[in-house]
Image: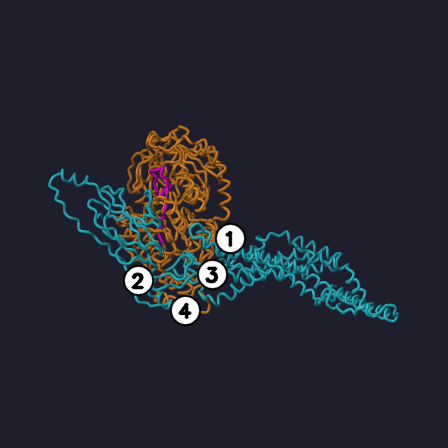
Amino acid sequence: MMTSKKMGIDFFSFGVKLTLGVALSLSFVSESSFANTKAPKTLTYALLTEPPNLDSSQATDSESFFIVGHTMAGLTRYDDKGNILPAVAEKWEINDKGATFYLRKDAKWSDGKPVQAQDFVFAWKRALDPKIASEYAFILYHIKNGEQINQGKLPLSQLGAVAKDPHTLVVTFEKPCGYFLGLTSFATYLPLREDFVTQKKDKYASSPENMLYNGPFKLTKWIHGASLRLEKNDKYWAQDQIQLDVIDIPYITPDANARFNLFKTQKIDLIQALSKESLANAQREKFKLKKFSDGTLFYMQFNFKKGRPTANKNLRLAIRSVINPTEFVSRVVSIPGTQVGVGLVPSWMKGNQQSFRKENPIPVPKQNLAAAKEYMAKARKELGQTTPISLVWLTGDTALAASEAEYFQNLFKTALGVDLKIDKQIFKQRLSKMRSGDFDIVSAGWGPDYADPMTFVDLFTSWNGNNHGAWFNDQYDKHVRNAMNSVDTKYRMTEMAAAEKIFMEEVPMIATYERTVMYTHSDRIEGVVRRVMGADPDFTNVRIKE
Amino acid sequence: MDSLIHAFGLLALDMEVSMQEEKERVLTTQNEFSQDLFQKQVKSVQENLIVRPSLSYWQDALRRFAANKQSLFAFYLTNILILFSFLGPFIWTRNPSHQDLNSPSMSPNMGKPAVVVDELAPVIPLFAEIPVISTTDETSDLVTEEKAIGSVQNFKVIGFPTTQNVVLGWDYVPGASGYVIYRNEVKPEDGALGIPLGDVMEGNQISFEDAQSLEARDYFYAIVPKDADGMETTHNTVLKVQVMTAISVDSAKSLGVSSEIGTHVRLSSSPLGTDSLGRDILARLMSGGKVSLFIGIFAAVLSIIFGIILGGIAGFFGGLVDDMVMRFTDLISGLPFLLCMILLKVILNVGPGESGITALLISLVILSWTGTARLVRGQILQLRNSEFIQAARMMGAKPGYLIVRHMLPNLIGVILVTLTFQIPSAIFTEAFLSFIGLGVASPATSWGSMCNEAIQSLLTRPYEFFAPAVVISLTVLSFNLLGDGLRDALDPKLRSNE
């Protein structure tokens, strides 16, 4: 049930420690591949980590989404502005009860066979199969019987998705769903071909020859932990629009300094996010910088489990009042363009007509030391004054995570007299500690899965497995359910705004910032698209300048 | 021994003198030669006498030590480092964990100028009135469309530029649909304008406020007008702005300077600069040194004591005891340090975010005594069979007396030398563990964790890294040199040079 996509500050992991050695040894591997790929139009790139899982029904993280997004095509796709465009589905009809997708006839798999409606049905059933245990199975719950199938209460055949003929896909909804179309480009909704997947069994997606592609590129080389290579897929229906022959990924390194040097020496064409430290250097090196708000909301989440001091509302209010968001964003996060986190729904999210935040304004939080002291006094009384309050702050192992933690540690100590113990953990370990509720406050981030406020709002419902702080509120749940079960956008937005209002009163988490990254790419390429959802960065339409 | 030889020498000379007098007397009594053939010899023997004060073992060692410039230098350096860490904070009284976000990431300075400012109020953007162009027919419309958009004129700073905000203003560019503002730390060249700060969406907006992570330095702002399609044009106007540190009224009060808005004040100096959270690096270096040196000295002393006891027992009693103790030593020296420390953290119930120093100390003590024990055992085995011990034993000396009176004084040299080599190795271990995040917990710091924090900005602000790195190197070097010097002084047989 864990959706770990873009969770955490881990994109900024700059550990120079041991990764340098890895990077050095990697460069040997890459030299040879460079030599014989001079002629084709090649773009080089460095991944942050090895993609953990390229099986589209099981992928959960942004590196896997990056690869899958380039090698696969779903029913629909997003354009650069977040509008939904047709992809494998040429056209569709959608209403409260369900949707019908008419698939294009020229969509083919990389082995030449056509992409058919049953491929989608098979992929969805597979993701919902309790035996597969896909962490993103819940995103298919909008399809009739999806949830029950995933829980093993109904057989797979009961799924409300049927291939009427090879080119017509009929989907029945569990409940009316206003944002279903936006989901259909998501990785879990991508097609898989039954004969191929069943033949490969556990080996599926473990190496290039054990995968099938229907997107613009295909994976031709994957040396685990070292390098990957994507080449143009000549079976892709719009392959004449793809100008790039090869996306070469000769490096995998989480080290920002290493990536900076790779770019400087023209070994890679793009740095996806410059660290705050390397920004100054990038200016000195005369890199052309670009700004991208990746839509991820970062926040501190409180633990409500029994015995945790953070279950005390006055303590949470005291913490909220003591934070100076503008100072934090400007001095600690320190990437120009970063926005102060205001509510639960980030500012870029579209609401009814314009942005959700504009339609449902929340005043920008301000530091109020006097109020903080008052709340704190109350909290101390309620918690019993005898014990000095000491909280565990669970966070990532990155430089930014560390300075954020030390900033709050100092602030809480001087202003509230609260001791903060910093528990730095690597991404995987932090997730496991979050799942087991082993924290008082956790610093985390959440990236959107689809273009609807719901992707953030349902995070704090009692049924969501990612509600790690175990904050349960009936009223909140009720409003969210109302919004989920309706297709009336206006009503849904009002309900979600009502839920957010309760959320702001109860403070189960405090939004800290909305991430913006500075990135740069070489002059020889153009047409790079940065995406909030889906494959980011998107190289599909990149042109190489001569 | 030396003094004994001297004594013998004196005795021999005395005897020679008295023999000569005797001879003289004999010659005079014989009376065969006239008296005036002879001259009385002046007693000058005393002048040739080589007298050296008797030197004890320690005096001799001290003399050797003082004669060695290298070890003297090391001795003074270690003292300076210890004084720096333990007495320094009484002179440099800045709080090492105080964060001053008004002045983060400052280069070494002796007090930078700042200006007191009011709390930030949102700046309302200015708008220009667009002259209405009468469009009577389509041709004139086309003409205005085709008219190239020029570069921005009169690009200027409104008000006083501080790290709180910089407000930029400019003249309206006819036809522009908006502007893009860039900020650069170096003079823009070849179209690399720096960080894209913001998009001004409306063509008639003529001001922009930058309040994003400003530092007290020179910036080059660039403004590019956008054409009707919202694309950036190729014209850019660059403005150099010198930004001054801004401090709030509250911080001015806490600094004890004039808190009137607009007054120019001087910030407290930070000779080694400040880190990314505005903490004074010099103060952190002192407080980190306390941790590092304490661990180094404490762990080394304890492990040496442990090593002496076990090595002494093994060497003195020999036989089965020796075998058992030495096999136990082999066993311990095979244990991996990191694993032991992590397990100890679990056993000691060190929670997340708590300092691992106790676990580190204990594991250092239990794992690093083996070398000393082996050395001491070897020495004792050698001494045990030496003549003076056997003599003492024959006279009925008990083991306790033998060890304390005869063996330990002979071991002291070896022990001191091991100690001085153990200290830097313990300091280095601590630095390494703190560097990988297993040592001290924030807000406490140590030289190793300071290095860890500073490595991120090594390329941009190397001084943050060099300060702790240099003191670690100096400490390790000086203790090693000191050990070397002590070895030369205490055990002349082991002298490395001369």
* Element on which disc 4 rests: helix
Residue B491 pos. (x, y %): 68, 59
Q: Is residue B301 magenta?
A: no
Residue A173 pos. (x, y %): 33, 42
Q: Nearer the viewer, mark 4 or mark 3?
A: 3
User: Are the residues under badges 3 and 2 in a single subunit?
Assistant: yes
Q: Nearer the viewer, mark 1 or mark 4?
A: 1
**Can you identify the residue that label 3 sits on?**
B284
| Chain that appears cyan | B
Labelled disc at residue A381 = 4
- Sequence-first disc among 1 and 3: 3
In this view, the residue in front, A76 or B202, is: B202
What is the CA distance from the residue labelled 4 to the residue labelled 2?
Answer: 33 Å
| Chain that appears orange | A
| Residue B26 in sight | yes
Q: Nearer the viewer, mark 3 or mark 2?
A: 3
Chain letter, disc 1 residue:
B
Residue A382 pos. (x, y %): 41, 67
For mark 1, does the 10 Å Cα neighbourhood hold few (<14), some (14 to 19), or many (20 or more) residues? some
At label 1, the amino acid type is: Ile
At label 2, the amino acid type is: Glu
Q: Is residue A528 magenta?
A: yes
In this view, the residue in front, B264 or B96, is: B264
**Can you identify the residue that label 1 sits on?**
B436
At label 4, the amino acid type is: Lys
Residue B494 pos. (x, y %): 68, 55
Location of residue B322 (image quadrant)? bottom right
At label 3, the amino acid type is: Arg
Chain letter, disc 4 residue:
A
User: Are the residues under badges 1 and 2 in a single subunit?
Assistant: yes
Q: Which residues, given as a range, are shown in magenta?
A: A513-537
